[in-house]
Amino acid sequence: MGNGSSMLTQYDIEEVQEHCSNTFSQQEIVSLYQRFCQLDRNGGGFISADEFMTVPEFAVNPLSQRLLRMLDGLNFKEFVLFLSAFSSRASLQLKVEFIFKVYDSDGNGKVSFNDVLDILRDLTGQYIAEHQREHVLTQVLEEAGYTKDSLLVPADFMKILGSSDLKMEVEVPVD
Amino acid sequence: MNKLNTSSSELDLDGPNIEDYLPSGSIQEPHGELRLRDLLDISPTLAEAAGAIVDDSFTRCFKSNPPEPWNWNIYLFPLWCLGVVVRYMILFPLRVMVLILGWIVFLSCYFPVHFLLTGQEKLRKRLERGLVELICSFFVASWTGVVKYHGPRPSMRPKQVFVANHTSMIDFIVLEQMTAFAVIMQKHPGWVGLLQSTILESLGCIWFNRSEAKDREIVARKLREHVHGADNNPLLIFPEGTCVNNHYTVMFKKGAFELGCTVCPIAIKYNKIFVDAFWNSRKQSFTTHLLQLMTSWAVVCDVWYLEPQNLKPGETAIEFAERVRDIISVRAGLKKVPWDGYLKYSRPSPKHRERKQQSFAESILRRLEEK
């Protein structure tokens, strides 16, 4: 009855663990697999954007549309890889790189002023005027020693975010 | 599934504040000068999103929890097989016979009463009530329902409505065998729909279609008319509007709570030792659900008729609904979640997202001013 956990052999689990650089325990992989099957309503082996949006708590997230671009059509291994940045075993480096990837919408390895502005727009919506958003962003960029035209690379993100106590962890429920 | 649309804003005003329920640990109140790091650090929002992907309270409300299997042991397996034989070969045919007998008795009495006693409304209504209670008792017998009723039995009085948590359509049968309630229910297709529009209609039951916005007004009007009639059957409403798996309660729709009547809460808790009474209408038809119940050993449940509640001065209908939900959840041991059960059929409104955006924007603006 949809209880597919028994279908994962130890080999499968180890393979997935390797794929996500051992950021999840075997128990957690089994839990994630159950969750994956639950979200994959039509049983196609991947989760579509529509299926992700059936989770209201996800749908109301300001960044959900942006994340869907990374999430749409993930199979189980990719699903676990996506979530691995949120594991407590993931390194700070991995977490910062993940955040960088969210910003870097065209995937060219550089984050421009507009990329940051896009995210800021998602997060603040109509509650800050566009010109004020640009003004604020220009100001803080300059204070941090960058300009409006600077292109940020992962190393910059590491410098900016790496020192702070970045807490980006999600606990996988294990029964 | 592709027809999912954003629920209308009118619906959302009904809701308790979702933010009150969601974990707020990740949202720390920032202080001091605004730095680039503060703008770039989107980790709290990302963690929230990932948390919802890994586990979320809404999906948990509608997850079927089948009973733990106990047959995977060489000693237990033959016993379990024996049980299967007894349940399917002996109990099930017996139960089908009980049900058929019930229907024969019911129909052969109901039609004469319904068509011949047209002159004596009062007597006819009383007999029909009795007959519906009878057929429901047959239904309960057909799954060997072991139902324990606690508290005083509901009586017929104008200006009161009964509200209960909802797990399956059998809730209705379980309650109906004690008191002939008039119920507000989703219109179903198939044989259930036929029963609804013929027999149950004579009890004063009201049907609607969840997706029809127009129906909502008609139902609201019918409701008001019904509760003020002195001789009408007591009204039963499942304010969740959808079946929940009996571990959680979802938001109560406020309709039942703004009629200006006394609200009598009823809590129903099923014991899952033999069968999961949750009707997952996405996965099985009502017939399959009934067959599942009829081939199990028994359906065990507790029903509590709780203290009648009235709107307190200054209380809104939504607050009243939440208070009654509290009472039912505590009694039946259910966890409360803020979600509207109709989200099974539609997407949450952008309003909730906008509220998050607003609070983030405000914190940025506040810190700008601090400089």
Image (tube, coloured by chain):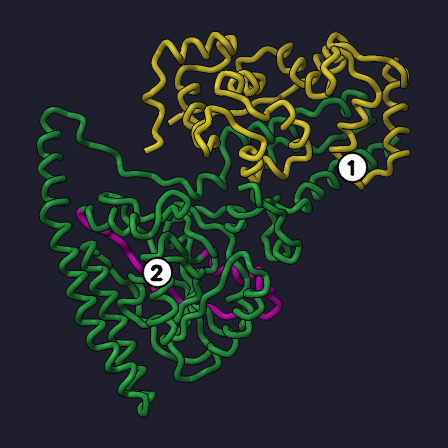
Chain colours: A yellow, B green
Quarter of the image for residue B213 reads bottom right
In what quadrant of the picture does the C terminus of chain B appear? top right
Reply above or below: B335 against B241.
Answer: above
Q: Which one is in front in this view, the residue at disc 1 or the one at disc 2?
A: 2
Q: Look at 86% across and 25% down and name the residue there.
A: A137
Residue B181 in view, yes or no: no
Residue B318 among those drawn in magenta: yes
Tag 2 secondary structure: helix
Parent chain of label 2:
B
What residue occupies the far bottom of the structure in this picture? B119
Is the residue at mark 1 from the same chain as the one at mark 2? yes
How far apart are labels 1 and 2 at the CA level? Answer: 51 Å
Mark 1: amino acid: Ala
What is the magenta range?
A: B297-326
Q: Look at 49% across and 39% down and name the residue there.
A: B57
Tag 1 secondary structure: helix
Mark 2: amino acid: Val
Residue B161 in view, yes or no: yes
In front: A93, or B198? B198
- The location of residue B10, given as percent across then percent down, is 65, 58
Q: How crowded is mark 1: few (under 14 residues within 10 Å), some or many (20 or more)?
A: many
Reply above or below: A52 against B247.
Answer: above
Quarter of the image for residue B107 reads bottom left
Marked residue nearer the N-terminal end (1 or 2): 2
Q: How crowded is mark 2: few (under 14 residues within 10 Å), some or many (20 or more)?
A: few
In front: B277, or B322? B277
Q: Name the residue under label 1.
A: B361
Q: Look at 40% across and 60% down and name the residue there.
A: B164
Q: Name the residue under label 2.
A: B192
- The location of residue B257, given as percent across then percent down, is 52, 66
- The location of residue B254, given as percent across then percent down, is 55, 62
In front: A120, or A2? A2
